[in-house]
Amino acid sequence: MKQSAVAVPLTIAALSLLALAAGCDQLADLADRLADAVIPAEPQAAPPSEPVAEDVAAELPERPDTSTARSETDVISFRSILDNKQMTRRERIRAFENLDPAALQKPVAKSNVTAAPRGEGAERTAKNSEPADWELATARRRVPVVMYSTAWCGVCKRAREYFTEKRIAFEEHDVDQNAIARAEYLSLNPRRSVPTIKIGDEVVVGFSAQAVERALDAAARARLN
């Protein structure tokens, strides 16, 4: 303890004794004033200082710096709240906690989706789903169509005209003129009726526009699956 701190109480005690002995009111008053002056005041805690950004970050909910949350008025990021020096620590924490947690968003990666393929052999997104019109039309043009006919067959003539009108590519073989074609024709249709039309793997005996279209669609879908 310092000497000055000890000397002051001793001086006050001496003055009090002298005042009592001498009956001097002035000395007593002086002793009381000195006693009041030297009584130490209660120490007061220093006001809390604003923590550094690292302390605030530790108190905030854990979120990626790039995460965002949408409030009623704005989209705000975790980093922008943390770096706002005009807000107090408590204001920054409250600002983030008051945002709707369900609205937190992570950066969205750009999609790599490309345009639909344009080739017949392009893989469809769903194998068993209904093919697009352009897929079916492309596949129909690739279906082989072979008609076995004769020159005197009127139904063969109507089938020929239909294929030409609808721009359906086909091969035609006269079974009276081509022995190889006649053998193929007889293997497909032992009943020996013309026209006999082979569409993909299906054989249509006679001619019907509906039967031809159904066979073309079935063969095209089979190529796509």
Image (tube, rainbow, N blue to C red):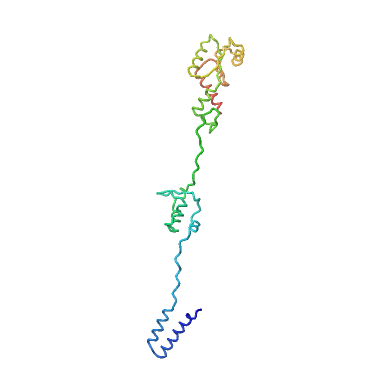
Instruction: Examine the image and state in which quarter residue 14 appears.
Output: bottom left
- Expressed as whole percent of the image width and height from the top left, the position of residue 168 reads 51, 19
- Expressed as whole percent of the image width and height from the top left, the position of residue 207 reads 52, 15
- Expressed as whole percent of the image width and height from the top left, the position of residue 39 reads 44, 78
Q: How many labels does the image show?
A: 0
Residue 191 falls left or right of residue 167: right
Above/below status of 179 relative to 72: above
Along the line of sight, which residue is nearer the eye, 151 or 196?
Answer: 151
Along the line of sight, which residue is nearer the eye, 194 or 35?
Answer: 35
Instruction: Examine the image and state in which quarter residue 144 appears.
Output: top right
Residue 171 falls left or right of residue 87: right
Is the C terminus in the top left, top right, bottom left or bottom right quadrant?
A: top right
Along the line of sight, which residue is nearer the eye, 190 or 149?
Answer: 149
Along the line of sight, which residue is nearer the eye, 189 or 73?
Answer: 73
Above/below status of 67 relative to 201: below
Residue furthest bottom as drawn = 22
Above/below status of 79 relative to 160: below
At 49% across and 27% down in the image, what residue appears? 134
Residue furthest top as drawn = 152
Above/below status of 116 relative to 204: below
- Expressed as whole percent of the image width and height from the top left, the position of residue 113 reads 51, 36
At 52% across and 19% down in the image, what residue appears? 169
Instruction: Examine the image and state in which quarter residue 198 appears.
Output: top right
